[in-house]
Image (spheres, rainbow, N blue to C red):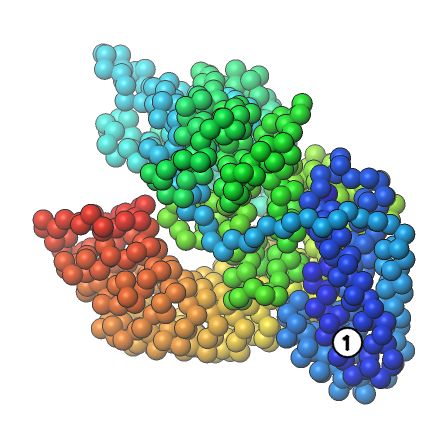
Amino acid sequence: MELALGAMAGLAPKLGELLMAEYVVQKGLKPDIKSLSRELVTMKAGLEDLSKVPPDQLTEVEKLWARHIRELSYDMEDAVDDFVLCVVGGECAADATDANVFKKILGKATTAVKKVKHRHQISDKIKDIKKLSDELAGLRAKYTVRGPGADLAASTGIDPRVLNLDKKESDLVGIEESRDKVIRMLSIGTKDDAHAHAYDQDLKIVSIVGVGGLGKTTLAQTVHDDMLKKNDMLKKNEKFGCFAFISVGRTSSLTRAFEEMLVDLDEKYSQVDMSRWDEVRFSNELRKFLRHKRYFIVVDDIWHVRSWEVMRYALRDNNCGSRIIMTTRNFEVATKAGEVYNLKPLSDENSEKLFYKRIQSQEGESLDGVSGELSSKIIDKCGGIPLAIIAIASLLVERPYEDWSKVYDSIGFGNEENTTKIVSYSYYDLPSYLKPCILYLSKFQEDSITDTKSVIWMWIGEGFVHLEKEEGSLFEVGQRYFNELVNRSLIQPMDGTYSWFPQFFRIHDIVFDFIRKLSGVQNFITVLDNREQHASPDSCSDSKVRRLAIQNHHVQCFPVDSMEMPEVLRSLNIEGSKIENTAPLHRFRVCRVLHLQKCHVPKLEMSLKDIGRSLLHLKYLDISYMAVDELPKELGHLKSLQSLVLINIGLDELPLTVCSLTQLMCLVAQGFKRFPANRMGNLTSLEELRLKTVVGRSTTEDLVAELGKLTRLRMVMMTLAEELDESLQKALVRSLCSLRELQELVLSSSGLQQGATVWEDWKPPMQLRRLLIRGIHFSWLPGWINRSCLPRLCFLALGMYAVEVQGLDNLARLPELSYLACTVGGFSWPPGYTVGKDGFRNLRFCQGGV
């Protein structure tokens, strides 16, 4: 059962602090709230127990009880938050789940309540809380739930065994034979006879077909990456001019796939507004672009013949020797696409290799105690499906071997597809705090590549991430949540082989199908998509739409008649859609997350003015890739806002009002030319800052100076149109010295400046993980790049004029360095330099010639 605890986790600390409020004590409401707090502890424990049990094993009474508790917890949290807003007059918390912040607000409330004219409004809120308390107590007395179950210990980082699965191409179990076979079928560089040139000018298409979870995408990606690496070694007439890899999925509209393909083929298309293009426009643009080019394109995950036919028309046969790989689980589609490679399950031997590779903590570890009859039975049930093998191994890896038989018996396997059963068991085995996090990902589009940091900020905005006994910031706790889902093989990092924390990730189709279905059935997220279908809640008339995602859909009227949701909607995601008539945004008064991307919403500017006055609970606001005439000053009234993402919205200037958002922890602003740089220092809560592109000398100077005031920053990414001369570099280093929490610095500037000696004065924080500087060429490797100063550095990209032996030795000894891109201009690397046996021990990617 999903259940996701509703708002229980965030509600408990709020009630604890509410007990201490002077107004509550004066009115004699303390006993009622205290009783409610005790009741919530029991209810939360009951929900956690039920969340471990698959739905088919629950009674209808248990399902009904859990549904009522979840809905009441949402209503309860809304009532508590409204109480605070009513008293404080809009100055609500940046994060109401943070007990310390909530306590401060209640302190303000005690003073402010004396000034409130309409005291009965506050009393009404307290009465609402008391009424809900009585309902909860009645439900608890009426229904019974199961006994407690064991929760799982939390992980804190990505398990190295997961990264070992995909260290490098040659390590992928069983991939070499399949890869070489597909390359031979593509006839690339394999013809030696006199007719080879003529033969190779034809368009060649190979389709990879197989069941879900078999590794079709991995195989296609491996071939794509292999050809990209070897492209320079091909003969002149065999070289490819452009490459692309795109995923399609089951969507009936290919516009998103076409847009991604164009950007992949040529970066210039990333600056083109394609939000209004239809399939015909995309097809014509692709045919025009590819007219005289030899291209290599992978079209991943085609489900329908019609989708392939549309895609095939756009990918013209231009007699240039182009190559296409298509993957599908539909054999009928495969037969429409040239030669077919039928991908087979892994052999018994390779299945064992993959299983034990996930189980082992490091290469070469003894398998004594885990290899045996039971292991063979578990591997055999996976049927050679890599996804199933990795999922079950991820389940078992932290459990003693003595418990494996219990897991095997619990899965049961039954008559359903084994892989789906394993994914299902993996979900129900999750601790309660991870369930809403994985279910929340069902709101994104299938096969999408998703920004990890954005998702974590959304989790925080929704109230899924809690500090409680955890150490660090909310974002760092969210990172740990993400890592746990990676370790359990429920999400797939896209760059985990050379990054301590993946920047992007995707979800396998089978996992996505499972969470999308479960989210709908349990009324966690409702999805309206271009197939005009939506995941409807369970057959319970009192279920309310709390979270809504509209994807690639044309909606005449929103909300639709069957969805009476504005007053209770907590999350609204509209992507690639057109909404003809919509309710004003101010009606969505309890909304926490508002995400608008590539969509058309009439009168949006008017609605944005309203949200500054009414959406005082809003924590996450994202407006991206759509034209907005104005960002109103009312935006500065969103005192709860934690994350603001504004990308390519057609405005030149980021308004000054943004600097009023003193609780803001994440600011992403891209596509602007002017910034209120001299006020940016007001945003003292910022932990993540991404700006692109900063234009003008004075603006750059102000921004660099203000940067030093933002001492909580963990991540800085800035693109500067101004050259960083020596004076600007001095100012920048001075500001960087104040950022002692910094983990990532990504800095790009125009032109090519020599690195000033002032950089030697920078003492970067020891937790720095990622350092990328473009536009500055250092004379030599800075002395602070060594294992004692930067023991956690894993991603380094710098430009230098020379590298000395000592500098290379320092690089080689960095214990966690996995990505190195060093360009050396004017001088070569030291001749005869050899790397010791312990040098670069974790390096996965190298560019620059070590």
Question: Which residue sits at x=38%, y=33%?
Answer: 172
Name the one closer to the observer, 769 or 841.
Answer: 841
- Considering only vertical position in the picture, is 767 above or below 701? above
On the question of residue 117 being in view, the answer is yes
Quadrant of the rendered image containing residue 346 = top left
Name the one closer to the observer, 702 or 46.
Answer: 46
Name the one closer to the observer, 815 or 640.
Answer: 815
Name the one closer to the observer, 213 or 526.
Answer: 213
- Residue that carries the numbered disc 1 in the rendered image: 19
Give the image location of residue 250, x and y in percent.
61, 31
Q: Quadrant of the N terminus?
A: top right
Q: Secondary structure at mark 1?
A: loop
- Considering only vertical position in the picture, is 507 above or below 594? above
Classed neighbour count for the residue bearing mark 1: other residues with Cα under 10 Å, few (<14), some (14–19), many (≥20): some
- Considering only vertical position in the picture, is 582 above or below 689? above
Q: Is residue 554 left or right of residue 342?
A: right
Give the image location of residue 743, x and y in percent.
41, 64
Give the image location of residue 753, x and y in percent.
26, 65
Amino acid carrying label 1: it is Leu
Question: Which residue sits at x=23%, y=50%?
Answer: 838
Q: Is residue 60 left or right of residue 458?
A: right
Question: Which residue sits at x=41%, y=30%?
Answer: 353
Q: Is residue 378 left or right of residue 584?
A: left
Give the image location of residue 170, x and y in percent.
33, 33
- Considering only vertical position in the picture, is 22 above or below 224? below
Question: Which residue sits at x=41%, y=73%?
Answer: 739
